[in-house]
Amino acid sequence: MQKDKIFSKPLSTVRPFQFDENVARVFPDMISRSVPGYDLILTVLESITEKYVQEGSNLYDLGCSLGASTLAMMHGINKKNCRIIAVDNSRPMVDKAKSTLDLYHSPAEIQLVCDDLRNINMENASVVVMNFTLQFIEPENRRKILRDIYKGLMPGGVLVLSEKICFEDNNQQALNDELHLNFKKQQGYSNLEISQKRSSLENVLIRDTLETHEKRIREVGFSVFEMWFRCYNFVSMLAVK
Ligand code: GEK
C-alpha cells in the first residue's frame, strides 16, 4: 500500500481537496489512517449486506472510490441474480477500482460507473451504501439524494450512511476534534500534514450534526434509524425502508 505523503511538504498554496490521481494512488492508506473504524465499518457492511440483500435486486455503492465498500457488499451477497452498481465521479478512482474489482470472481454482476451519483436512477434496490460520500455534496442537495435513495429502495431495503459529523455543543466539538487529531498523530501524520489537509478540506467536506442526519432520514420516509457505529466525530448510520 503506497503511503500518503500528499501534505507532508510545505505548500505555498493549499488548494481545495480533489479526488485526483495523486489521491487515488494513496487512497487506502489515506482513509484508513484518517478515519478511525474504517476497517470495522467495511467488515460490518458485509454482514449488513448478508442481512438485507434480496434476490434479484440491485445494490448501490455511491462514491465508491477504489471499491472497498463494493467488495464488502460483494462478499455479503448470499442471494441469486444481484447486481452491484458502484459509482464515483472521479475518473482516476474508477479506473483503479476497475483493476482491483477485476481480480475477484464476484457472485453478482458489478457495474462501475464514472458519473455524478445524482445522475444515477436507482431502482429495485435492497442495499444502498454511502460510505463517507454525502459529506462531499453541497448540503442543500443532500435531502433530494436521500429522497431518491428512499424511492429506489424496495420495502425492507437498507441505506448505510457513514459520515464525519459536527456538534452543536462547542465543548463536545472541541473534545472530539482533539481526540481525532490524536488519532491522526498516532497514525504517523505530522502537524503540518494535518493542518494542510484540514485547510484543503475546508468548504469541500461539510459536516452535518447527527441530529440533522436523523431528522432528514426520517423525513424522507425511513421507518428505522440506527446509529450503529461511532468513534469521535465519525458515525455510521443504518436506515430501513
Ligand atoms: C470507501 N466509499 O472506501 N458523485 C459521485 N462520487 C462522488 C461525488 C459525486 N457527486 N462527490 C464525491 N464523490 C469509499 C470512500 S471517499 C471518502 C469514499 C473520503 C466521491 C469522491 O470522488 C470520492 O471517491 C468519494 O466520493 C468519497 O468505502 O475520502 O473521505
Image (cartoon, rainbow, N blue to C red):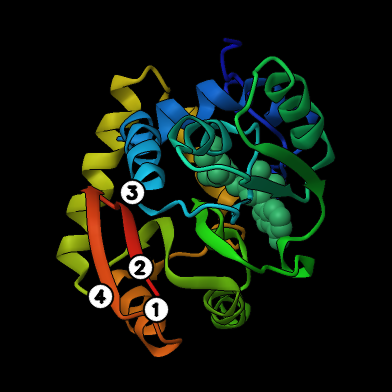
Residue denoted by label 3:
51
Q: Secondary structure at mark 4?
A: loop
User: Which of label 3 and label 1 is nearer to you?
Assistant: 3
Where is residue 233? Give x, y as percent.
Answer: 29, 52
Where is residue 33? Give x, y as percent.
Answer: 41, 26
What residue sits 57% from the left and 10% below the top? 1
Where is residue 164? Give x, y as percent.
Answer: 39, 55
User: In the displayed structure, would residue 109 be above or below residue 159?
Assistant: above
Q: Earlier in the sequence, mark 2 or mark 1?
A: 1
Amino acid type at circle 2 is: Ala
Q: Are marks 3 and 1 in contact (CB under 8 Å)?
A: no
Amino acid type at circle 4 is: Glu
Residue denoted by label 1:
217
Q: Residue furthest top?
A: 1
Residue denoted by label 2:
239
Q: CA distance from mark 2 to mark 3?
A: 13 Å
Q: Earlier in the sequence, mark 2 or mark 3?
A: 3
Amino acid type at circle 3 is: Lys
Q: Earlier in the sequence, mark 3 or mark 1?
A: 3
